[in-house]
Image (spheres, helix red, strand yellow):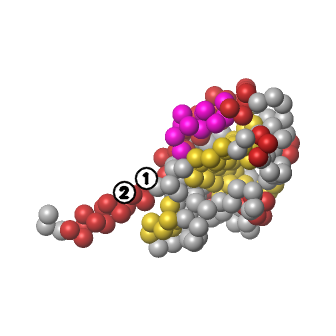
């Protein structure tokens, strides 16, 4: 190959696009590039008896409207962390939009959690991917802090499934597979209310 450094750079860019990423870095994950932490695609599910206390996420969405997950108690809530420039966030956005539209009648709510973008970048992403659910503007870190000690956000994207009581029932670190998330939602929906 004539330009081995170009090949290495292309390979690194591809790996970053396929892995989860988070701005600012965090020593709890595998560093893929300075300033980014990769999610490894791992999943975890907690048995009902192993789940911690309920989590309530509150904040304001990018339209300026209040969001409070306690209004959705009794339903299943999927929380997805994202930011507009995150390659895996862009890859999984169509699947999340489809789940929100297709599963709403089953009592499934989706909520984005964005710790990075201002309203302009976030709303452009939401419009481009036709996102039908709200995202909390969490640049202050308030909503993210509610998850510390329960299911810390170590990579973006991270996807959490909250049970009907608001407890974390499942987690995907990094780029999600639609079938995996659907199965996690199905498991929680099948639980007794």
Percent x, y for residue 50?
Answer: 76, 46
The 10 Å Cα crowd at callout 2, few under 14, some 14 to 19, many 20 or more, is few
**Closest to the observer, 51 or 106:** 51
Q: Secondary structure at mark 1?
A: helix
Seen at 20% across and 68% down, the residue is 4
Label drawn at residue 136: none
Query: Residues in magenta?
Result: 176-186
Vertical position of residue 97 compared to residue 32: above or below: above
Question: For mark 2, what is the residue?
Answer: 14
Asked whether residue 180 is drawn in magenta, I would say yes
Seen at 36% across and 57% down, the residue is 14
Vertical position of residue 107 compared to residue 80: above or below: above
Question: For mark 1, what is the residue?
Answer: 18
**Closest to the observer, 145 or 118:** 145
Asked whether residue 44 is drawn in magenta, I would say no
Q: Are marks 1 and 2 in contact (CB under 8 Å)?
A: yes
Q: Quadrant of residue 138?
A: bottom right
**Residue 69 in view of the camera:** no
Q: Main secondary structure of the magenta part?
A: helix
Percent x, y for residue 168?
Answer: 74, 47
**Residue 92 in view of the camera:** yes
Q: Secondary structure at mark 2?
A: helix
Percent x, y for residue 18?
Answer: 43, 52
Vertical position of residue 187 compared to residue 80: above or below: above
**Closest to the observer, 47 or 131:** 47
Q: Quadrant of residue 27?
A: bottom right
The 10 Å Cα crowd at callout 1, few under 14, some 14 to 19, many 20 or more, is some
């Amino acid at each position: 190959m004539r330009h081995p450094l170009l090949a290495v750079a292309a390979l690194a860019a591809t790996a970053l696009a396929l892995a989860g990423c988070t701005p600012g870095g965090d020593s709890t994950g595998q560093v893929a590039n300075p300033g980014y932490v990769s999610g490894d695609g791992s999943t975890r599910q907690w048995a009902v008896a192993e789940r911690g206390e309920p989590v309530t996420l509150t904040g304001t969405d990018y339209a300026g409207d209040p969001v409070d997950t306690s209004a959705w108690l009794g339903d299943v809530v999927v929380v997805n962390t994202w930011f507009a420039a995150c390659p895996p966030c862009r890859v999984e956005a169509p699947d999340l939009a489809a789940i929100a539209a297709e599963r709403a009648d089953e009592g499934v709510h989706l909520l984005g959690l964005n710790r990075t973008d201002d309203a302009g970048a976030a709303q452009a992403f939401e419009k481009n991917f036709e996102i039908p659910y709200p995202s909390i503007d969490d640049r202050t870190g308030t909503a993210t802090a509610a998850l510390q000690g329960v299911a810390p956000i170590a990579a973006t994207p991270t996807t959490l499934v909250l049970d009907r009581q608001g407890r974390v029932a499942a987690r995907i670190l990094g780029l999600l597979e639609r079938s995996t998330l659907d199965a996690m939602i199905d498991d929680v929906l099948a639980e007794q209310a």
